[in-house]
Amino acid sequence: MSLQINDRLFWPQGRTKAVTFSYDDGVSQDVRLIEFFNRYGVKGTFNLNSGLSGSPGTISAGGKTVRHDKLPDRDMIRIYAGHEPASHGLFHSCLYGMDVARCTREILDCRAQLETIFRVPLTGFAYAFGACSDTIKSALVSCGIAYARTIRSTRSFDIPQDFLLWDPTCHHDDVQLFSLADRFLSDEPFFSFFSPAKLFSIWGHSYEFDQNDNWDRMDSFLQKISGHSDVWYATNGEICAYVSAFRSLIFSVDSRFVYNPTAVPVWLGGMFGRETVRADPGQCTKLIPPVEI
């Protein structure tokens, strides 16, 4: 016999599924992608290089040559409205092998310049080229970065244990994208010691849709993944902030009560049940009684 303590994380309103998107480089194709996102009611985080904004160019890596024109500062607030801007490094430099001082400049200057444009604190980051190391991570902490996305696909729906090494579920061109969506949308129980709630995190570059002539792929995927009442559609930052609020909760020793010291309401439940309780900000909340399993 074992007692199930009902102290596991559920998404807002007791949902069991969350979807988030992350797109890099801040290029002109983001405009079309955001039109897709807005049409289907999903949210994305867009990782920008402030030192390159407004720069024209092309790119051939991974496919045919297409435009790689960086969006100018003056258009960013309008284009990214309703979504989250985040840092991707000042000049999209590979930080691997750099000392802390140079890493810090690349990260902090980018953050500061983007905050001047958007007039809000920006604490998200995506590793340029996916290059990460202990030195880079140390610099991120010093720069006040709360989460940083890698390019290592997990093909799983686990919530990151370390948000400074946030491995996404998959790239949008992953051959398993649609089968992963089927698994994600399924109501079959998802087992994780941390939480029964799933997180589907998709990343990419919007110019890749031009390279591969597959905008229809994203349209089909968004049709499939959107409009579900049991799915929370959130930015990367919203996901991180919610999980951080959960990790700040203070539980009584006997697991009967929980105090929420944050400004974010958090939903809690059990590993094998669907009943939840809302822990309101600044309040002490009685948990659902333990269940024998």
Image: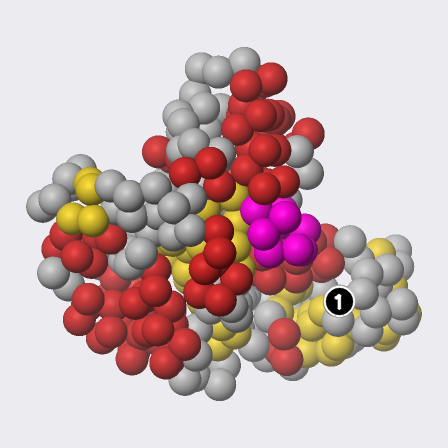
Where does the image place residue 205, in percent across and percent down from the top left?
Answer: 30, 51
Answer whether residue 31 is visible to the viewer in this image: yes
The image position of residue 259, as x and y in percent, is 87, 64
Q: Nearer the viewer, residue 254 or 55?
A: 55
Q: Farthest residue in the left direction? A: 64
How far across and how far down the image is residue 87, in percent? Answer: 52, 43
Residue 115 magenta-highlighted = yes
Instruction: Please state if 222 lies on the left or on the right of 234 as rendered.
Output: left
169 sits left or right of 87 in the view = left
Looking at the image, what colour scheme do you see?
secondary structure
Say if the magenta span includes residue 43.
no
Residue 182 in view of the camera: no
The quadrant of the rendering that contains the C terminus is bottom right
Q: What's the residue at 12%, 44% (across, down)?
A: 65
Which amino acid lies under the numbered mark 1 shown in the image of this protein?
Val
Residue for badge 1: 264
Say what secondary structure mark 1 lies in: loop
Front one among 191 and 73? 73
Where does the image place residue 38, in percent across and percent down from the top left?
41, 76
Is residue 118 positioned above or below 11 on the image? above
Q: Which residue is nearer to you in this view: 291 or 221? A: 221
Q: Quadrant of the N terminus?
A: bottom right
- Which range of residues does the magenta coloring cover? 114-126
- Front residue of this view, candidates 11 and 208: 208
The correct choice, above or below, for 122 with respect to 8 in the image is above
Q: Quadrant of residue 96?
A: top left
Mark 1 Cα within 10 Å, few/some/many (few <14, many 20+)? some
Give me the residue at 54% from left, 19% from top. 102
Q: Across the whole image, how many numbered discs are drawn on residues?
A: 1
Residue for point 42% across, 51% down? 72
